[in-house]
Image (spheres, coloured by chain):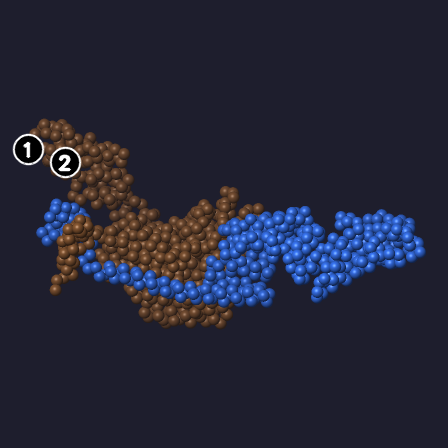
Chain colours: A brown, B blue
Amino acid sequence: MKPHSERSRDLLLKLMATPVRRKYFETLRRMLGPSGLISIREEQFFLVLAIAIGILAGFAVVLFRVAIASARIWLLGSSLHPGWPRVVLVPAVTGLAIAVIAVRYFPRVRGSGVNQTKGALYIYDGYIGTGTTVGKFVLSALAIGSGQSLGPEDPALQIGAGLASAVGRWLKLSKERLRLMAPVGAAAGVAAAFNAPITAVLFVIEEVIGRWTAGVLGAVVLSAISSVVVERWFLGDEPLFRVPVYRLDHAGELLAYAVLGVVGGTASVVFVKIIKSLRPWLRRQPQWSQYLQPAVAGGLIGFIAIWYPQVMGAGYEWMNLAMHNRFPWELLGILAGLKLVSTVLSFATGTPGGLFAPVLFMGAMLGGFVATVEQQLFPAIAVPVGAYALVGMGALFAGILRAPMSSVFMILEVSGNYSIILPVIICNSISYLISRGFQEVPLFDLLSRQDGLDLPSLEEEGEESILRVEDAMHPTMGRALLGDEVIASARGIAASTQEANFLVSLGEGRWSVLSREALLDPAHDDAEPVRALIRGRVPRLYQDQSLDVALRFMKDRPMLPVVHRGNLDLLMGVVSVEDILRAYRRAGLAEPETAEVS
Amino acid sequence: MSEETANCTICRQPLGANGRCQHCDEDRHIWTIEDWRPLLTLALIIVLGFSFTRLVVGVFNDKQSALAKDFDAAGNRAMDERRYAQAVEAFESALVYSHDNFQYRMKLTDALAASGARSEALAQLHDFREQHPEDAQVNLKLARLEAKQKHVDEALHYYSDAIDGVWPDHSDPVPQKIGARLEAAEYLIALGRKDEAEGVLQAVAAVLPYASLQEPRLAALFLSNGDAERALGIYQAQLNLNKTDGAARLGAARASFAAGNYATARRYLEELKPETEESAALRVELERMEALDPFAKSAKGRVRTARTMAAFHIAMARLAGCGVPFAQAMTGTGKAAAAGDPAQWSGFARWAEQLSPLMSENKLRGKDDVIESTMRFAFQAEMAAQKDCGKPTLDDEALLLLARERLGAGQ
């Protein structure tokens, strides 16, 4: 029997035999590759695949949200205020079950999932086991549904990445592409969970990829958008929060928001410091205690929830109430504090679940608290509680998760309210700066390092000094040779210097390098143009390009021209391999603490 | 084979002898799908995933709707039983499962207001209004809450917006707009802003459809605003349509009574069968008033003088009940115990002193001027006492009604 591909081709040729259809099949045949099968660039295929990943991740996240809500109803009952025995026992018993399953069968599902996904990208060539994805789905749904103080967004990120990884492996993508599948799926997961595609793209760049790289940006955007389309198809396009209409009446009000930035930054530092200390301490405890830790955390949260049921689960409904001024200032303050304690308990014990929602909860309560206190202290200032709660969310997001751009866009997207951007930027910046000032390593990097992984960080990368061509180049001794001048003139210039190589300007921004030997070659007549000696062109460099780029172009070339961006024939200097190495040595980068190859 | 087909369609490099692009294959930047099955399977997975997700979400939504309805019913029960805190909790739970449901939100604001959390209810309603400023229901609820908070300007502003607002699509807006106007008029009457209320009521009367169910309410509001004539006109129109309409007949009796047309009022009451508690009370009031009215057509001779003397004694008793010490007030030396203007009480005392010797059947018989002066004294004394003294007796009320009829409501 003929192989599948040959049978397809035979069928095609038979169909083409019909004269009327010949034209159409000729077009079709052009679309088909040389072997009679569709051939497209892997980059193009990757973009198409990103859409498919987005759709699948959208399905997964919709089902995940349904699973969380169903688990909540099933475990805690349908009322907003379940009875106290249920409130205490359910999180504890479910925590025990989750710990047993997680420790024994799915060790990689513990925690939020963000740093695990980053690890998959940088360490495991994009591999996230199918078991891990399924385990994350089930155990996170149980944990959040049972009232652990965790949210669904980070698990959705890992579920999306896991799905993408599984599809990539199944389609036997190249290692390079498979590695990039993780962020593509992660963006789809976060986008669907938050109903916020821009935030998802930014967050994946800031926290998962950790680098501003355009290579994967298109696929990440496509997957995020397609997952949001799916999510809205099934769950509607209502924003996550119903935010009261906000208007900034006077610029002086921004000062009042700045206070919230300070409070949010301080709370962020406290939260991260506690996680930083408590998580390794709990991990050092005997193995048997690992089974009990989520149960104890669940029991303690349940105990708190007897009086303050708001601390359980993601708590979006309570955030909405806080935004609508439904809580007195005392309760807002208490809830912010208790949520911090509950989230630390749930997260540090390794219960699967995310930090996004609890962080937003703390921010909303803290924002509402600051607003109500300011209302009492300064009755003359307009202090809308809803706007403060919203801005507080951004402040905590920026301070704890240290993703400043995501934090701004997240507030805009989840609220659908763009008039609040100025207070958000001010408040988030203050919170972010305070957090950076008192806590050097961002939370997710801290968690990775506690797990023994050292992953790239956008924040740390931004602080590294970048060496540029202008740091290494040196000026030319004389003028560059021109392609159209006669060899005799060029030889005269060569005779006046000791240079071994000469740059030749060929016009229209084209350059070449000519060795002294080639120039003095007697086989060429003096009257011939220099152009006759040229055997190839060399790439040009600009002063602002990094030395890393310059090194890639150097190959075995003795030097490269550095030209003006506005006039490509204007030589600013030259750079050689020796110049570049000298610049690196000067900057002390020859032996970095952590050597990385991009 | 054309020249085109000799080159790779992707990278335009010449094809090898086997027809494959060596350049592409070597550089691995071409994705050659040699086996369609994975892609077809992926497409199938998407289709199946869509179907499965739709099924699950459908079942879940049904479950959510059922839970929301259960909590809504529980909330309604709690409201009926005046367990407002439980109602708030139930409606909040209903909103967890149906967070877009406008009616649940409205009920929650009602429950919040009823439970005493008026500011929370107001905050919620203001949020809705910011999102849907034209929503008449929201504006009406806001008006009611602001009225309860004694924020008169805001309440009237929201009533106005409710009247001009947009009502739900499935309902007829005309009766709802009229209802909002009538409610606004009721609020104005309660505030004592009778002219504005009259304007609103007349506007409603102009647009009210023929035989509208709102007519009785409009008539009642005209009546309570002091416009008995218009009220009577509406009741009579209703009776023309349905002569057995007991409510309209009672209303007509009330309107006639308020207009001082006792004979007509009595006629309506007599035609009202069977007699109700309200009509009986009105009849008693009417009879008491007639028993005190010396100017009634049926009152002649002895009856007339008897009614005049009775009115005088009722007014004297009322003044005495006010603490007017007649002897001291007449000399102007003592302190008047009653509130208000002491000179006024002295005047009444002197007037009473002049009339007192004339209060006998013989001295009153045929003396219409004395009878008229005595009744004027009685009316004015009752009206002055109404302002500054305590609750009137039934006889006092009857005299007051007579006074309004004879002297006019403004006096």
Q: Please give the count of numbered marks on the rendered protein.
A: 2
Check if mark 1's residue and mark 2's residue have beta carbons within 8 Å.
no
Q: Which mark is residue B256?
A: none
Q: Is residue A31 above or below residue B85?
A: above
Horizontally, residue B256 falls left or right of residue B4, namely right
Residue shown at the point (85%, 54%) measured from the top left: B324
For disc 2, the chain is A
> Looking at the rendering, in which quadrant would you find the N terminus of chain A?
bottom left
Q: Which amino acid type is shown beneath numbered disc 1?
A: Ala
Q: Which of the marked residues, 1 or 2, is nearer the chain's N terminus? A: 2
Residue B279: x and y in percent read: 72, 62
Label 1 – label 2 distance at C-alpha = 15 Å
Task: Name the residue tied to disc 1.
Answer: A523
Mark 2 nearby-residue class (10 Å; few <14, some 14–19, many ≥20)? many
Residue A123 visible at all: no
Say what amino acid the circle numbered 2 marks: Leu
| Residue that sits furthest to the left in the current view | A523
Chain letter of disc 1 in the image? A
